[in-house]
Image (tube, grey):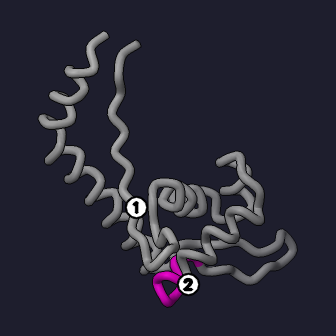
């Protein structure tokens, strides 16, 4: 079995995970689908779980990372706020920089695992 490297960054605010890989994936899914419901379905989670994750982020950041859009004939939707888009962008940038900075050390440790 070939080892793989997974770098998972989390930012905590007290005991809560303000942002981490799953929450960033959820933000990306909301951005792509325009809906918390559709994003949850795409990720294989319940609407309630997705809503709770969004609520945690909104509380941790002190202002919305996801904003609801008023419903009409087809119902409402959701979109990333400017803050949410910036959090997503900066998180992905930090993730890429961390992976690049640690690549040699992580590759060395991976080689020590053997076959």
Q: Residue at x 68, y 80 (%)?
A: 69
Which residue is drawn at the image coordinates 22% and 52% (left, top)? 98
User: Horizontal and vertical percent for residue 113?
Assistant: 27, 20
Residue at 39%, 71% in the rendered image: 87
Residue 37 vertical placement versus 113 (above, below)? below
Image location of residue 80, percent across then percent down: 53, 73
Badge number at residue 110: none
Residue 114 sits above or below residue 45 on the image: above
The secondary element bearing badge 1 is classed as loop
Q: Is residue 84 left or right of residue 112?
A: right
Identify the residue at the far right of this view: 73
Q: What range of the chain is rendered magenta? A: 60-66
Residue 45 place in picture, x, y as percent: 72, 52
The quadrant in which the C terminus is found is top left
Report crowding for label 2: few under 14, some 14 to 19, many 20 or more residues within 10 A (C-alpha): some
* Quadrant assignment, res 106: top left
Reading the chain from its start, which is encountered first: label 1 or label 2? 1
Residue for badge 2 = 59
Circle 1 packing at 10 Å, graded few (<14), some (14-19), many (20+), is few
Q: Is residue 63 left or right of residue 106?
A: right
Residue drawn at (26%, 59%) of the image: 94
Confirm or deny contact between disc 1 and disc 2 (CB under 8 A): no
Left or right: residue 81 versus residue 45 is left
Residue closest to the eye, 79 or 64: 64
Q: Nearer the viewer, residue 35 or 16?
A: 16
* Residue closer to the observer: 10 or 35: 10
Q: What is the quadrant of residue 10 in the picture?
A: bottom left
> Would you say 38 lies left or right of 93 here?
right
Place residue 7 in its image quadrant.
Answer: top left
Q: Which residue is mark 1?
A: 10
Quadrant where the N terminus sits is top left
Query: Disc 1 to disc 2, how far (Cα)?
Result: 16 Å
């Amino acid at each position: 079995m070939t080892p793989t490297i997974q770098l998972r960054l989390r930012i905590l605010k007290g005991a809560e995970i303000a942002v981490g890989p799953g929450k960033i994936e959820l933000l990306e899914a909301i951005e792509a689908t325009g809906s918390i419901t559709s994003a949850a379905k795409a990720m294989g989670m319940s609407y309630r779980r997705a809503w709770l994750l969004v609520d945690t982020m909104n509380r941790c950041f002190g202002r919305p990372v996801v904003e609801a859009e008023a419903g009409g004939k087809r119902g409402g939707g959701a979109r990333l706020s400017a803050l949410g888009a910036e959090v997503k962008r900066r998180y992905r940038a930090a993730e890429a920089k961390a992976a690049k900075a640690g690549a040699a050390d992580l590759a060395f440790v991976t080689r020590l695992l053997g076959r």
